[in-house]
């Protein structure tokens, strides 16, 4: 479904990605891991059009994403969450998700103000869908609470529901369990697993190795801007190059460390 072919990126004199190639097959969960500063977020920023690659190509189902603007990439069916939470704190959870849908449908939040029957019907449908998405992430009971009142973990779940509101064919998650406690991590792992079984294709960046190894079908490892290993989780955990890359940097987890070790 998603394919990166020889993607490189330089920021001025700094070479951040070099010849990065990997694929995310339809219906799979792929993890992109690597030590701090390896270039993982830059990969997501390039896929979503926030950052232009210096060279290389990105395709989704065979058509090029390279050169598209972020909103065009969203329109093609790529949804994402960010490392830093970006929910609207002064809105309810339901409103947050509905706004995500309106942004996607491109008739503007202003559409909510009209009382024309078509708009009202669409708003009704959007609210029903939003409640369903909130239930997927275990937040249905808090639909009418302000996002500002949520715990950090719940705000991350809200971000996920909002990303799903754009009806993505491909969902990109940037450190989905960062800052969560162990209980929340286990819960989110189950919920992301269920979302995947509903047919979503997912590419995620995550430092928490139990989350990655427990959830992903395939794992790609970035180190200093290069892919050094790719394969099923069990194989990656035993790969000497991967172990070496992690052992060289004491601020990161060694793959296989217990849940929460890197929170
Ligand atoms: N806009 C930019 N301008 C200059 N350098 C940048 C820019 N964005 C990222 N970098 C550099 O690129 C390198 C890779 O950063 P990136 O955020 O992609 O790494 P990462 O693997 O996501 O790290 P982390 O796990 O800490 O989030 C870093 O050295 C970073 O300083």
Image (spheres, grey):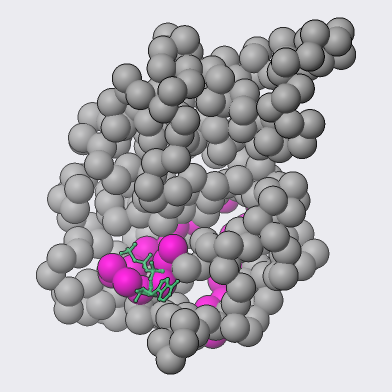
Q: Is residue 217 visible?
A: no
Depth order, front residue of 231/7: 7
Q: Is residue 9 visible?
A: yes
Residue visible at 56% across and 38% down in the picture? 163
Vertical relation: 237 (above or below) 120: below
Q: Is residue 125 left or right of residue 232?
A: right
Q: Kindly indicate the quadrant of the structure image that contains residue 206.
A: bottom left
Vertical relation: 227 (above or below) 207: below
Span of residues in magenta: 19-41
Vertical relation: 158 (above or below) 114: below
Depth order, front residue of 216/118: 118
**Is 80 in the magenta?**
no
Q: Kindly indicate the quadrant of the structure image that contains residue 176.
A: top left
**Residue 18, image x, y percentages:** 49, 85
Residue visible at 69% across and 51% down in the picture? 71
Q: Kindly indicate the quadrant of the structure image that contains residue 23.
A: bottom right
Depth order, front residue of 128/214: 128
What is the total number of numbered labels drawn onto the structure image?
A: 0
Q: Is residue 115 left or right of residue 170?
A: right
Residue found farthest to the left: 250
**Residue 172, image x, y percentages:** 53, 50
**Residue 148, image x, y percentages:** 35, 24
Residue visible at 66% across and 42% down in the picture? 168
Residue visible at 61% across and 73% down in the picture? 52
**Is 33 in the magenta?**
yes
Q: Quadrant of the N terminus?
A: bottom right
Q: Quadrant of ligand 1?
A: bottom left
**Residue 239, image x, y percentages:** 31, 74
Q: Is residue 225 left or right of residue 253?
A: right
């Amino acid at each position: 479904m998603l394919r990166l072919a020889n993607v490189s990126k330089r920021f001025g004199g700094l070479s951040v990605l070099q010849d990065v190639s990997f694929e995310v097959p339809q219906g799979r969960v792929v993890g992109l891991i690597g030590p701090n500063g390896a270039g993982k977020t830059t990969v997501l920023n390039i896929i979503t059009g926030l950052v232009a690659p210096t060279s290389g190509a990105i395709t989704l189902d065979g058509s090029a994403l390279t050169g598209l603007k972020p909103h065009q990439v969203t329109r093609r069916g790529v949804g994402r969450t960010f490392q830093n939470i970006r929910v609207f704190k002064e809105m309810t959870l339901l409103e947050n998700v509905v706004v995500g849908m309106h942004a996607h449908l491109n008739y503007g939040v202003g559409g909510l103000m009209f009382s024309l029957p078509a708009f009202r019907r669409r708003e009704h449908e959007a609210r029903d869908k939003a409640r369903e998405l909130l239930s997927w992430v275990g937040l249905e009971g808090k639909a009418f609470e302000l996002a500002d009142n949520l715990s950090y973990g719940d705000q991350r779940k809200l971000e996920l529901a909002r990303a799903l509101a754009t009806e993505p064919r491909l969902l990109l998650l940037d450190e989905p369990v960062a800052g969560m406690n162990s209980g929340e991590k286990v819960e989110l792992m189950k919920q992301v697993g269920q979302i995947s079984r509903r047919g979503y294709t997912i590419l995620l960046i995550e430092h928490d190795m139990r989350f990655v190894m427990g959830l992903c079908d395939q794992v790609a490892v970035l180190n200093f801007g290069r892919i050094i290993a790719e394969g099923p989780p069990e194989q990656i955990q035993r790969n000497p190059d991967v172990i070496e890359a992690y052992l060289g940097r004491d601020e990161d987890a060694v793959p296989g460390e217990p849940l929460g070790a890197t929170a």
